[in-house]
Amino acid sequence: MGTLETILSEHPFLKGLALPHIELIAGCASNVRFNKGDYIFREDEEADRFYLVRHGLIALDMFVPQRGPVTIDTIQEGEVLGWSWLFPPYRWHFDARALQLTRAVAFDGKCLREKCDKDAQLGYDLVKRFSQVFMQRLQSARLQLLDLYGDTTRK
Amino acid sequence: MIPRPHRIREIRRDTNDTYTFDLVPADDGPPMSFAPGQFNMIYVAGVGEVPISISGDPLEPRATVHTVRAVGSVTRVMCALKPGAIVGLRGPFGTAWPVREAYGSDVIVVAGGIGLAPIRPAIYHLFSYRDNYGKLAILYGARTPRDLLFRRELEKWRSRFDVDVDITVDSPGEDWYGKVGVVTNLIPRAHVDPMETVALICGPEVMIRFTVIALRDRGVAPENIYVSLERNMKCGVGLCGHCQCGPEFICKDGPVFPFSRVERYLKVREL
């Protein structure tokens, strides 16, 4: 197993993925690095990749008029950034900005979609993994909406 | 049952609505000793009484320390008091965090909002007896960076080499370069061995419920998860029933419970 395959098989997002599939998707992957302050992608750009974060911290921002960029979530080591590559029209909905030096494995979304179209088991496995991420992020967002630490005496 | 007069020796403002009070006996007698997790009924003359957890170091009993958020009639008046004013204390009451029972284990502390105050005495104990524990992780979430309690202390704890401190806020400001999101997001990557971990949780009840789910998903045994609950209290000594949660009196059977003991009552909305 090459270095990239080893990195992929050890990343929490891909833990348990069959080795042949690791080797298959490694063909769509490359190591990338972002310095503090770098934008990884911007809202409305083409969503042509996603990232497995190996080290660092990324802010997911939404630009709000008169408020500027508002961070709504952060993605850290061991997590995955980006799912808009999965669904048409394949455009990013937020900005992603490195809050510190960040290393990740970037996947070419088009390359991976083509491999998933040919290998249904791979496609199903990846969608299951992303579904877990959707569920966890939705759950977190709902808890944030509750404003749990606010003044509970005010109705 | 009679409040013991205490003088406010010092007040520190923690956030825009939260203050920490150092209280000493007005008769210059010895301060009370307490176990981490216990609370006092604090009486403000002419206004009323309110249960507040002790937030100081049990090994530093020079003053009785309480962290108070100005949210109700009694606490709003108390937070407007000045040093030298007198309040009454009854206590300490309630059960303690299982800090001795956790000897030999890894410990994960999960706190949200003002929940860091009642659990801070346990943290002090963990640090004072550090050699008795395995890995330590302190996870804390607050609404915004301005609502982070004991910020200087958090930074000091974070600078230690023998504890993993992770902080997140629900809503960042302009100058926040840390994590954003709910505190449960910090659990998957906390540096503890779930099979050897005792978990202590303090915060809003919704936060507690989801934290327990995240801990169980991580592999922490249900019998090793402890929570601190709160309810409206009047007597503080298990007589009036105001604080009952099912058959449990929060004032005398709690406020610290093994989660398994109270889990089913937390699912009953009427309680």
Image: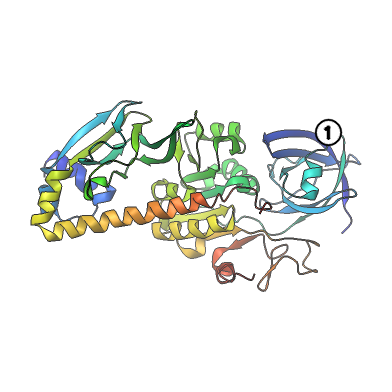
Residue displayed at 14% across by 44% down: A110
**From the viewer's perspective, is B120 left or right of B171?**
right
Circle 1: residue type: Pro
Please tell me whether mark 1 sits on a helix, a strand or a loop. loop
**From the viewer's perspective, is B104 left or right of B152?**
left
Q: Is residue B17 above or below residue B174?
A: below
| Chain to which the residue tagged by mark 1 belongs | B
User: Which residue in the rendered view is the most extreme toward the front?
Assistant: A65
Query: Where does the image place residue B216, in percent across and percent down from the top left?
Result: 43, 61
Res. A82 image quadrant: top left
Residue displayed at 73% across by 62% down: B251
User: Which quadrant is home to the C terminus of chain B?
Assistant: bottom right
Residue displayed at 31% across by 27% down: A38
Q: Is residue B37 visible?
A: yes
Q: Residues within 10 Å of mark 1 (few under 14, many from 20)?
A: few
Q: Is residue A151 above or below residue B249?
A: above
User: Which quadrant is home to the N terminus of chain B?
Assistant: bottom right
Nearer-the-camera pick, A101 or A132: A132
User: Which residue in the rendered view is the most extreme toward the bottom?
Assistant: B247
Query: Where does the image place residue B94, in percent across and percent down from the top left?
Result: 71, 59
Nearer-the-camera pick, A97 or B195: A97
Query: Where does the image place residue A48, in percent across and percent down from the top left?
Result: 20, 40
Q: Is residue B105 visible?
A: no
Query: Where does the image place residue B100, in percent across and percent down from the top left?
Result: 59, 54
**From the viewer's perspective, is A52 left or right of B203?**
left
Q: How many marks?
A: 1
The residue carrying mark 1 is B83
